[in-house]
Image (tube, rainbow, N blue to C red):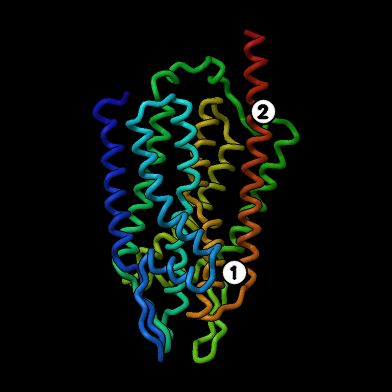
């Protein structure tokens, strides 16, 4: 269908597969504790330790999202691109894959928090190994490929001719009446909750012989950016926990107040949806739950207010998405029907 350009997708999928295999075979993280043996973790090893300690649910989550799902996703992407199937089934499979893709980053956030907690501590320490970087590369390439597949399928020839009423000029804030004000109100709440979640401490070290410190997303990101050995993890924190969520809110606000065609309006909603798939506060929240259970033998921590603001930001984010779709898509459909009658 896409000619020579179509070979870019399987090439990227293959690179992601190679990185995944390297991530599974190479060590992830080395943890050192005084009077205890140094432990070198790999993805399979961490799952085995979780099962040994009876943390069944957490072990299943890590096994499912960090080991099984990335390989299944690669296989399904190959199937989407090469296997004969109806276009509707192809699109349904691709939608499921792209919405679940970010959850594979859960283990990276676990590693990042453990690195921050052990930073500048005398009795504990942690060091990254190459497996982490191969895993990050595998997930990023896989997610990027999934977005590319989605875009290419949406631009397929049979969608080239869209109805003329898609050229209607609309401004959501003016078009959808008084109920449109609920969206900027929720967006403002989302921005406030996100700002508090980023700036307020989410965990505090509470263990004898260790420096008592509290960490927020912002301070954790700064610590990793200042340490060249873990700069890559810091970039993931900054991009997926700060920059992308803020960009998504800004994009939704621009979409709601700007004037554009229905086609342009839906394109902006598509961009905000893509940003939502790369915003990972919800994945980070689950990673913190793992830290408070799996990591308690490494460093004991107490929950701080930032974690509650994080949960609030996640809930409001889900609400604003639902409200926009409920308010906007219904009215766009009505607008199209009225336009057809007039024509």
Quadrant assignment, res 147: top left
User: Dot 2 corresponds to which residue?
Assistant: 330
- What residue do we see at 42% from left, 68% from top? 46
Q: Residues within 10 Å of mark 1 (few under 14, many from 20)?
A: many
Is the C terminus in the top left, top right, bottom left or bottom right quadrant?
A: top right
**Residue visible at 31% across and 69% down in the picture:** 129
Q: Residue at x 45, y 48 (%)?
A: 101
The quadrant of the picture occupied by the N terminus is top left
Q: Residue 84 location in percent, x, y?
A: 36, 26
Closest to the observer: 121 or 272? 121
| Residue at the spot 63% in from the left edge and 52% down from the top edge | 190
Q: Is residue 23 left or right of residue 224?
A: left
User: Which-is-in-front pick, marks 2 and 1?
Assistant: 2
Q: Earlier in the sequence, mark 2 or mark 1?
A: 1
Q: Position of residue 139 (x, y in %)?
A: 38, 52
Spot occupied by residue 123 in the image (x, y as percentages of width and height):
42, 88
In the structure shown, which secondary structural element does the residue marked by tag 2 occupy? helix
Q: Residue 200 has which mark?
A: 1
Give coordinates of residue 279: x percent, y percent. 50, 52
**Left or right of residue 210: residue 192:** right
Q: Is 320 drawn above or below residue 238 in the view shown? A: above
């Amino acid at each position: 269908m896409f000619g020579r350009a179509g070979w870019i997708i399987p090439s990227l999928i293959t690179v992601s597969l190679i990185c995944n295999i390297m991530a599974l075979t190479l060590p992830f993280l080395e943890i050192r504790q005084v009077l205890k043996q140094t432990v070198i973790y790999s993805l399979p090893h961490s799952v085995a330790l979780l099962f040994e300690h009876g943390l069944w649910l957490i072990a299943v989550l890590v096994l499912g999202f960090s080991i099984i799902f990335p390989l299944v996703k690669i296989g399904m992407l190959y199937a989407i691109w090469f296997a004969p199937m109806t276009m509707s089934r192809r699109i349904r499979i691709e939608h499921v894959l792209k919405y679940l893709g970010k959850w594979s980053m859960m283990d990276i956030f676990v590693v990042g928090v453990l690195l921050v907690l052990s930073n500048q501590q005398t009795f504990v320490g942690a060091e990254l190994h190459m497996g982490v970087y191969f895993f990050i590369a595998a997930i990023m390439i896989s997610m990027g490929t999934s977005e590319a597949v989605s875009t290419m399928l949406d631009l397929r020839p049979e969608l080239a001719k869209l109805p003329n009423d898609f050229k209607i000029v609309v401004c959501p804030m003016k078009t959808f009446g008084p109920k449109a004000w609920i969206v900027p109100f929720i967006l403002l709440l989302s921005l406030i909750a996100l700002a508090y979640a980023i700036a307020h401490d989410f965990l505090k070290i509470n263990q004898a012989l260790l420096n008592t410190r509290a960490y927020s997303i912002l301070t954790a990101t700064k610590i990793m950016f200042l340490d060249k050995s873990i700069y890559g993890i810091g970039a993931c924190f900054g991009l997926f926990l700060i920059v992308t969520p803020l960009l998504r809110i800004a994009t939704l606000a621009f979409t709601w107040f700007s004037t554009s065609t229905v086609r342009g309006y839906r394109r902006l909603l598509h961009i905000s949806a893509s940003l939502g798939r790369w915003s990972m506060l919800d994945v980070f929240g689950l990673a913190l739950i793992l830290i408070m259970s799996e990591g308690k033998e490494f460093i004991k921590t107490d929950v701080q207010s930032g974690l509650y603001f994080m949960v609030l930001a996640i809930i409001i984010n889900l609400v604003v998405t639902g409200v926009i779709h409920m308010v906007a898509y219904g009215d766009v459909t009505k607008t199209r029907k009225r336009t057809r009658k007039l024509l």
